[in-house]
Image: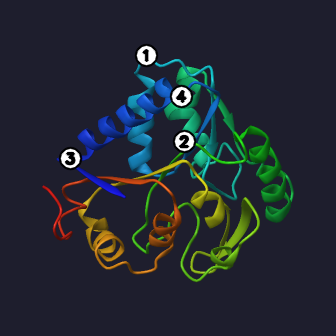
Amino acid sequence: MSVHIDPNPEALSIGAADLSASYVADMERPLTIGLAGGGTPAATYAELAGRDIDWSAVTMWLGDERWVPHDHPDSNTRMAHQTLVDRVIVRLAAPDTAFGEPEAAATAYSHVLQDIFFEGRPDLVLLGIGDDGHTASLFPETEALDADSVAYLANWVDSKEVWRLTASMPMLWSAREVVFLVQGESKAGILAQIIDGGHPYPAQRVAAGAGSVQWLIDEAAASKLRSLPR
């Protein structure tokens, strides 16, 4: 695990874009990038959209999606298209939230992902964390945390009374590179519990089980961490 601290959100988005662009440039085969939802990743995608990058060998997919139509303001698919996909013409494989039922849509998307992953594994996966320690749509005290054999699943989040579609923990563990993007003082407490305290929030469990993990965070989010370079 490595932790890199940037001075502000703008520097964080530039650093995350640098890392993503380098990953694309260094890969000598078709590759996949898992996209996170939220404001911090959106700034990174907007930064990437302004770069001169050859996206022809890249397929993007979503680490999670809300159970809403793709044109809904809360849709991660919509956000990905607006900030990056439509601006650079890159392939995006998104779950079909018009499929009928969340479980059926998740199963269908699992098959899609297995077809696009090299040797059945994701390459670069970008993730965020929530104030409650969730990542992707792996929320505390939800059934998806116990899934051990599926790639993508429907997860009922009782605290929000909504369905979410999400990559499973085993799928995220299998990724070749996991990168968490975290910014803001509101994330400082939970981040300290995850990195310093090892508290088993979903984000900590993903980080603990993945083979290669990087944390890209800004100074505000890092303000409660111990024994890390500033």
Other-residue count near label 4 (Cα within 10 Å), few / some / many at <14 / 14–19 / ≥20 = few
Given contact means CB atoms under 8 Å apart, are the residues at marks 2 and 1 in contact?
A: no
Q: Is residue 56 left or right of residue 196?
A: right
Amino acid type of disc 1?
A: Asp
Image check: 8 left or right of 186? Answer: left
- Image marks 2 and 3: residues in contact by CB distance under 8 Å: no
Using the numbered discs, state the Cα–Cα distance from disc 3 to disc 1 in whole angstroms. 24 Å
Label 3 vs label 1, nearer the camera: 1
The disc label shown at residue 79, or none: 2
Circle 4: residue type: Met
State how far apart marks 3 and 4 are (Cα). Answer: 29 Å
Compared to residue 175, the image places residue 53 above or below, namely above
Residue 151: give x, y in percent of width and height.
Answer: 73, 59
* Residue at which label 3 appears: 8
Residue at 51% from the left image edge and 30% from the top image edge: 84
Please report whichever mark, 3 or 1, sits nearer to the chain's N-terminal start.
3
